């Protein structure tokens, strides 16, 4: 079976490519999009938080018409938030204004796929790639039937452990520090007066999120995504992601009271890449493009993957359209996404490196630095900018860390 475009993976990245490229090419070229899940986008494997269009236009000013691009239809918005609070290990709370909202991400994901199907794309669910040889991709459908596909262009949007990236030589060998293991509950029946549905809360400390952060992201007046992330090099003793999340819910002095008597409705787990994006995201010989988590296109300071996936997906779609019509090089994809997002990725990674230097070994270091940060400093952090205070102490950080007990 020959197809012009094969999209592997239909999370936010692959679904965005599908929804953008299908209307461009209509029935002139064939599209096959596959996902290993029976219902792509479900279960939802993220915190579902999105900065507002205004915040996104500030975060990625090089994205054309960013405000309009990141505007979601109200049917996909669960609740609006207007600030973010950072909780230090010993109880300091730093709150800063930041407009955002929680998505019904699964429904939005399904909507994108329906756009692709409406414009002629074929979509296979419960289907995964099992091999690639001599330009031919073998796909297993419903865990049994195998189909051989010969695509002209391949989009690798199959996540952090992308088979497409490995098969095409685009994957990079990454240290475990560049990955966060996450676990999240959707918690319902939240009735505490401490709960603020307009406030995204982020918690730090080795008992709750060693090497990363934990969160309460409101979904409604009585429900929230509650989760944590850990990084393996920062673990001590028998700590794991389940214990860290349990500690947050049951023992954190504030979170445990906020979530008291709430119930767990759903649970998800996964891995988030938090290193810099891959240097190469296009293989010209095999005509393969990597998009989203497959290319580590994630805001590494916070693990945010939806906005970069949307931008990269739209760029990939336009690049493919121009390539099929005008034979323009697929390498234009890499040039363009770097022009629009590389500055943000660089700032975010620099922040993550600062956090690594601060959080290594003991909570007292995180506490010492957070005691010296203000609301305006945290506002810079959530906008992927390094506060001047951190830049000032950077040359002396190793010495400071040695004396901070």
Image (cartoon, rainbow, N blue to C red):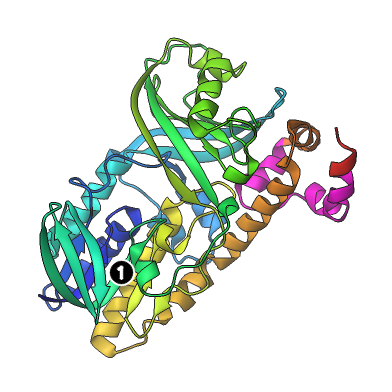
Where, by quadrant of the figure, is residue 18 drawn? bottom left
**Secondary structure mostly seen in the magenta stretch:** helix
Question: In front here: 127 or 14?
Answer: 127
User: Considering only vertical position in the picture, is 41 above or below 248?
Assistant: below
User: Considering only vertical position in the picture, is 249 above or below 303?
Assistant: above
Question: In front here: 324 or 399?
Answer: 399
Residue at the location (42% across, 57% down)? Answer: 293
* Residue 44 percent coordinates (x, y): 32, 40
Q: Relative to residue 84, is residue 297 drawn left or right?
A: left
Question: In front here: 41 or 116?
Answer: 41
Residue at the location (62% across, 16% down)? Answer: 253
Is 386 magenta? The answer is yes
**Disc 1 on helix, strand or loop?**
strand
Q: Can residue 125 be seen in this view?
A: yes
Q: Relative to residue 138, is residue 350 drawn left or right?
A: right
Is 364 magenta? The answer is no
Where, by quadrant of the figure, is residue 221 drawn? top left
Question: In front here: 44 or 132?
Answer: 132
User: Considering only vertical position in the picture, is 49 above or below 154?
Assistant: above
* Residue 114 percent coordinates (x, y): 17, 54
Where, by quadrant of the figure, is residue 86 drawn? top right
Q: Relative to residue 177, is residue 33 drawn left or right?
A: left
Report the residue marked by disc 1.
155
Range shown magenta? 375-400
Q: Is residue 23 visible?
A: no
Residue at the location (45% across, 52% down)? Answer: 305
Q: Relative to residue 207, is residue 333 drawn left or right?
A: left
* Residue 4 percent coordinates (x, y): 18, 77
Residue at the location (44% across, 72% down)? Answer: 170
Image quadrant in which the C terminus is located: top right
């Amino acid at each position: 079976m020959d197809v012009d475009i094969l999209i592997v993976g239909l999370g936010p990245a692959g679904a965005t490519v599908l929804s953008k490229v299908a209307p461009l090419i209509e029935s002139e070229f064939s599209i096959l999009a596959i996902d290993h899940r029976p219902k792509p986008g479900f279960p939802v494997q993220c915190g579902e938080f999105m900065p507002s269009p205004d915040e996104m236009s500030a975060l990625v000013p090089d994205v054309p018409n960013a405000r309009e691009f990141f505007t979601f239809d109200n049917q996909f918005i669960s609740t609006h938030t207007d600030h973010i609070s950072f909780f230090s290990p010993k109880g300091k709370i730093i709150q800063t204004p930041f407009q955002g909202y929680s998505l019904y991400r699964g429904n939005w994901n399904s909507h994108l796929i329906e756009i692709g199907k409406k414009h002629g794309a074929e979509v296979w669910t419960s289907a995964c790639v099992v091999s690639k040889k001599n330009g031919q991709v073998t796909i297993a459908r419903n865990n049994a039937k195998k189909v051989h596909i010969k695509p002209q262009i391949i989009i690798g949007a199959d996540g952090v452990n992308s088979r497409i990236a490995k098969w095409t030589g685009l994957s990079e060998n990454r240290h475990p520090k560049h990955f966060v293991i996450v676990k999240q509950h959707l918690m319902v029946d939240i009735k505490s007066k401490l709960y603020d549905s307009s406030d995204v809360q982020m918690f730090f400390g080795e008992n709750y999120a060693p090497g990363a952060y934990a969160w309460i992201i409101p979904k409604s007046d009585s429900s929230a995504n509650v989760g944590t992330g850990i990084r393996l090099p920062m673990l001590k003793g028998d700590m794991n992601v389940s214990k860290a999340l349990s500690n947050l819910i049951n023992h954190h002095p504030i979170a445990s009271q906020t979530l008291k008597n709430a119930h767990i409705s759903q649970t998800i787990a996964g891995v988030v890449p938090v290193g810099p994006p891959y240097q190469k995201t296009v293989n010209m010989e095999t005509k393969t493009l990597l998009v989203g988590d497959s290319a580590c296109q994630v805001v590494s300071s916070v693990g945010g993957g939806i906005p970069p996936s949307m931008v990269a997906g739209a760029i990939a779609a336009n690049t493919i359209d121009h390539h099929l019509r005008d034979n323009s090089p697929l390498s234009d994809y890499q040039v363009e996404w770097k022009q629009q997002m590389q500055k943000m990725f660089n700032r975010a990674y620099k922040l993550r490196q600062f956090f690594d230097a601060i959080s290594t070994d003991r909570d007292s270091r995180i506490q010492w630095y957070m005691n010296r940060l203000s609301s305006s400093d945290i506002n810079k952090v959530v906008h992927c900018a390094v506060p001047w205070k951190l830049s000032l102490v950077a040359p002396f950080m190793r010495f400071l860390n040695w004396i901070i007990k």
